[in-house]
Image (cartoon, rainbow, N blue to C red):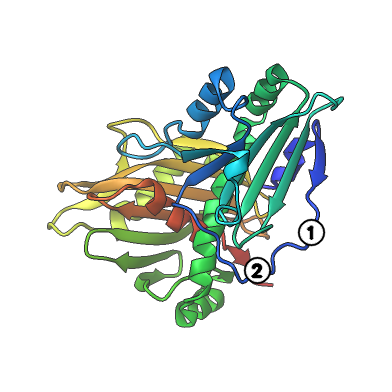
Amino acid sequence: MKKLFVYFFILTLVSCGGSFGDFSTSSTGVASEILVVSQPDIWQGEFKDTVSAIFTDVMYGLPQPESRFSILAIPNEKFTKILQPYRNIFIPEIDPSLEKSKLKLAHDKWATPQTIVQLQSPNRTKLIEDFVRYKDQIMDYFHESELRRYQRLNDRSKDFAIINMIKEKYKFNFTIPKDYFVATKEDDFLWLRKEMSTMSHAILFYKVPYTDTKQFSSEEIIKIRNSFVNENIPGSIEGSYMTTSLDVYLPESKVIDFKEMYAVETRGLWKLVNDFMGGPFVNICFTNPEGDQLYFIEGFVYAPENSKRDQIRQVEAILNTFEWVE
């Protein structure tokens, strides 16, 4: 996962006190929901509109518009023990005695997994400016909180047969839950599937020789992706196969820090040629430690009757358990 703390050097970073991470209490709250706790005179006007617009902005890479998060806002006095175990908590505060803003980040203070972001600024204008300046980092922080939730669930039901196979054959670790099965297993391609009554999840791994930095471009990533999924992922109709959809919008790629490695994350849509299935995918590519292979790990979902936001986060949570085998 991205090292979010690096981004906050300009603000004074204050660690919350206490012993975190050892709770028997499981966090509460709806998936992808943020609890905003503030004084009523803060949660109004421009600040409320700004925070609401950013938290509920459309998540890229989904076939239908879905907000990245939903919001539940309460005044401070309503933040009792019943709500303290909430998984994602944002606490904006105004303190005129402050000389500069403070951003406090904490994990697992009242429950596990839990993420708390507390932003303190000397006045309303500065509070809005601080939130806008660090909105991407704050959003990433809560996004990773959602991934932690799914990872914790997966840790309770590991498929050690698949995990050990991946470790021995491909020399890396994935935390794979028991409801997945191996659909295809080749030296340079792996397809894991999870089939449910109304949806499907999939995890892919594939690799190619690394010869040029141009392979990290969005165009090359999609070209390589199509070369594998066209050949290896057929549809239910004869002659149908998977490809990357360019019909609604183009896939979007960005450079990320993945496990302290340079990597490119790509989000977009897939579809079946000669069929009517499709859905979102997230793809991460990086080189192996030797630097001679370009690795791709990917998750995609098919969920025609369900929200795709939380489904794609479930497969992304698995991707983020990647570790090299030493």
Where residue 280 appears, as percent x and y from the top left, is 35, 45
x then y, percent, for residue 207: 49, 58
Q: Residue at x 64, y 66 (%)?
A: 324
Question: Which image quarter: residue 191?
Answer: bottom left
Foreground residue, 56 or 211? 56
Position in image of residue 266 (x %, y %): 48, 42
Q: Farthest residue in the bottom direction?
A: 161
Picture residue at 33% right of the left edge, 67% below the top: 194
Q: Which SS class for mark 2? A: loop
Identity of the residue drawn at 62% across and 61% down? 111
16 sits to left or right of 87 = right
Which quadrant would residue 269 be assigned to in this image? Answer: top left
Q: Is residue 201 above or below residue 276?
A: below
Could you tell me the amino acid type at mark 2?
Answer: Phe
Tag 2 residue:
23
| 124 horizontally vs 48: left or right | right
Q: Quadrant of residue 137?
A: top right
Element under label 1?
Answer: loop
The disc labelled 1 sits on which kind of residue? Answer: Gly
Mark number, residue 294: none
Q: Is residue 325 above or below residue 319?
A: below
Badge 1 or badge 2: first in the primary sequence = 1
Labels 1 and 2 touching (C-beta < 8 A): no
Marks 1 and 2, how far apart in space? 12 Å
**Circle 1 residues within 10 Å: few <14, some 14–19, many ≥20:** few
Q: Residue furthest front?
A: 77
Q: Front-most of 192 and 21?
A: 21
Residue 80: percent from the left, percent from the top? 60, 51
Q: Residues within 10 Å of mark 2 (few under 14, many from 20)?
A: some
Residue topped by disc 1: 18
Q: Is residue 218 above or below residue 232?
A: above
